[in-house]
Image (cartoon, rainbow, N blue to C red):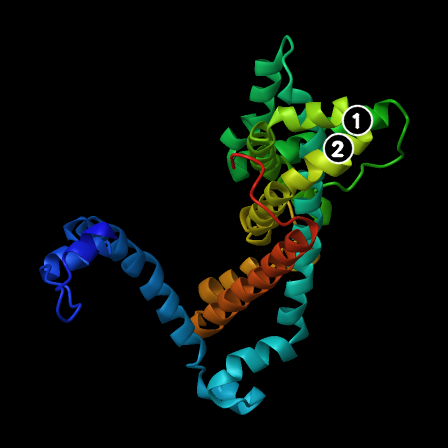
Amino acid sequence: MTTATQNRSPRNGKSTASLKHRLAERGVDSTLLLLVPALIFVLVLFVYPFAYGVGLTVQPDLARQEQWGGGIFANYVAFFNDPFLFDSVWITLRLAIPVALINVLVSIPVAFKLKGKFRGKRTLSTMMVLPITLGTVLTAQGLLIFAGRQGWLNKALLQMGLIDEPLKLVMNYWGVFFSLIVSGFPFAFLLISSYLSGIDPSLDAAAKTMGANWHQRLRRVTLPLLAPGLATTFILTFVLAFSVFPSARLVGDAMGSTRVMSLMAYRAFGEQNDYTMASTIAVIMGVVELIVIALVLLWRSFLYKGSTGGKG
């Protein structure tokens, strides 16, 4: 501000500094060239494919336009009027929302417990994040071996006489549900632990000094400060579960109870060579995710207004 004032002409108030100097004062200088690789990366790998995909959605074939109407929006009209396709939205939400909620709610007490110092903490923390290394395919194979009709769990329950016939825990809704829990919990645990470690412990100590019990401190101090982290964790685990694909094929009922949107997009793309409908389903997937994310952020704004309490 001082430099700009010094460079102004005393007669007409106009700046006498060079254009380069004035641009530098506004942050426009040669260092912006460092952004060029990142911009090219975003344009080539995100913006162009996204725009190309959206463009495909408004190029339906003539047969679909004649069958469903809607002109260039015939793909969208067909999606919302075909129960086989449209029901995939609710099927995917029925999987993703409970999985995200459970991962967040279970991670909170675990992160609280592992926040303190005790013997074996490092071992327990390693066990919590170990499923990240397994991958989706290995997790699905493990579920088949453990919870399949001939798996260890059913054999043990049959031998103990607790059940008369094997439980159906895979190749249905529950197979995908358990797979998403196993693969999503480590991410939720790591995120909430990060946010929790960033909350100033003196706030809890001050509330305790003023006579608040643990329940009051948790409800009035910790949880409000943790709210941004909980919202972010829910959003990330929800997006991870909403885009489920391998688990829905390997341990689910691909054309039945786990007929998720990604499977419908793959069916249109890989089996029917219908690229325009596959792009339409992908765009609708993104819109549904954005709606859920907006609702979660709205909930967070009502619950807590202020700076983020954690490091995450």
100 or 160: nearer the viewer: 100
Q: Real-space Cα distance between discs 2 and 1?
A: 6 Å
239 or 156: nearer the viewer: 239
Question: Judging from the image, what secondary structure is the residue with disc 2 in?
Answer: helix
Q: Residues within 10 Å of mark 1 (few under 14, many from 20)?
A: few
Q: Is residue 305 left or right of residue 215?
A: left
162 or 234: nearer the viewer: 234
The answer to whether residue 140 is seen in the rendering is no
Residue ID for mark 2: 218
Question: Judging from the image, what secondary structure is the residue with disc 1 in?
Answer: helix
Q: Which mark is residue 214?
A: 1
* Depicted 168 relative to depicted 11: above or below: above
Name which residue lies at 56% across and 20% down. Answer: 126
Q: Which mark is residue 292?
A: none
The answer to whether residue 56 is seen in the rendering is yes
Pinpoint residue 120: horizontal percent, then vertical percent.
62, 10
Pinpoint residue 191: horizontal percent, then vertical percent.
56, 35
* Depicted 218 relative to depicted 18: above or below: above
Marks 1 and 2: in contact by CB < 8 Å? yes
Name which residue lies at 64% across and 39% down. Answer: 225
Q: Amino acid at mark 2?
A: Leu
Pinpoint residue 174: horizontal percent, then vertical percent.
72, 45
Q: Is residue 50 left or right of residue 192?
A: left
- Looking at the rendered structure, the number of numbered marks drawn on it comes to 2
Q: Amino acid at mark 1?
A: Trp
* Depicted 160 relative to depicted 48: above or below: above
* Depicted 15 relative to depicted 200: above or below: below
Name which residue lies at 76% across and 28% down. Answer: 153
Pinpoint residue 286: horizontal percent, then vertical percent.
52, 63
302 or 185: nearer the viewer: 302
